[in-house]
Amino acid sequence: MGTGHHLFTMYLTDRGWLVADSARVWAAGVEYGIVARGRAPRQHPFATPLGTRRVIEKTGLERAELFGVVVDADPADALLKGMRALWGLREFSAAGVASALAESPAARLLRFAHHDPEFREDGGYSLLVVGG
């Protein structure tokens, strides 16, 4: 994870795509005793592939409303709808996303990564969003 922040995890469930906010997943994990209170471990669990998903599954998908939304749509639309719902975005634009990430106008580099079932990153892309 470096100095960046893990923002979202998304995966297919039997009800649709779960789009989960990482900070909310962490808070739910602490609340339900899945992760320790206080300082995060030396290597944050979300820094490893599928680490967030493990915390979600231990917390329970029945508690998904604590940390995310389930969207019945194709993957691209599910991600956009999930981000809009979780961040309260009125419009989905680079400036809107940048504003959701910081109070002051700023540029943010977002890295989207896909991991295969063997925990290898097998695709992804980066996106620069600039607030105005």
Image: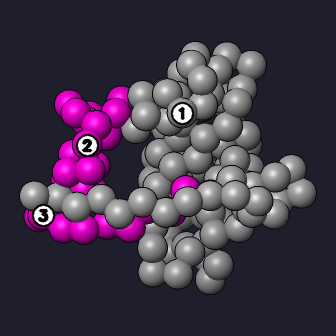
Q: Quick one: label 2, few (<14), some, or many (20+) residues within 10 Å?
A: few
Tell me if residue 100 can be seen. Answer: no
Of the pair 35 and 2, the residue shown nearer to us: 2
Image coords of residue 106 (percent x, y): 19, 67
Q: Is residue 104 above or below residue 72?
A: below
Residue range in magenta is 84-113
The residues tagged by marks 2 and 1 sit, at their Cα atoms, a distance apart of 15 Å
Q: Quadrant of residue 83?
A: top left
Camera-side mark, 2 or 3: 2
Q: Quadrant of the N terminus?
A: bottom right
Task: Name the side, left or right, on which 22 lies relative to 122.
Answer: left
| Res 76 label | 1
Q: Dot 3 lies on which element? A: loop
State the residue position of label 2. 93
- Residues marked 3 and 1 touching at CB (< 8 Å): no
Of the pair 90 and 103, the residue shown nearer to us: 90
Task: Name the side, left or right, on which 93 lies relative to 12.
Answer: left
Image coords of residue 76 (percent x, y): 54, 33
The residues tagged by marks 2 and 3 sit, at their Cα atoms, a distance apart of 14 Å
Q: Amino acid at mark 3?
A: Pro
State the residue position of label 3. 105
| Residue pictured at 46% horizontal, 55% vertical | 7
| Residue pictured at 58% horizontal, 47% vertical | 9
Q: Quadrant of the C terminus?
A: bottom left
Q: Earlier in the sequence, mark 3 or mark 1?
A: 1
Q: Dot 1 lies on which element? A: helix
Q: Dot 2 lies on which element? A: loop
The residues tagged by marks 3 and 1 sit, at their Cα atoms, a distance apart of 26 Å
| Residue pictured at 49% horizontal, 70% vertical | 38
Does 90 lie within the magenta span? Answer: yes
Q: Amino acid at mark 1?
A: Ala
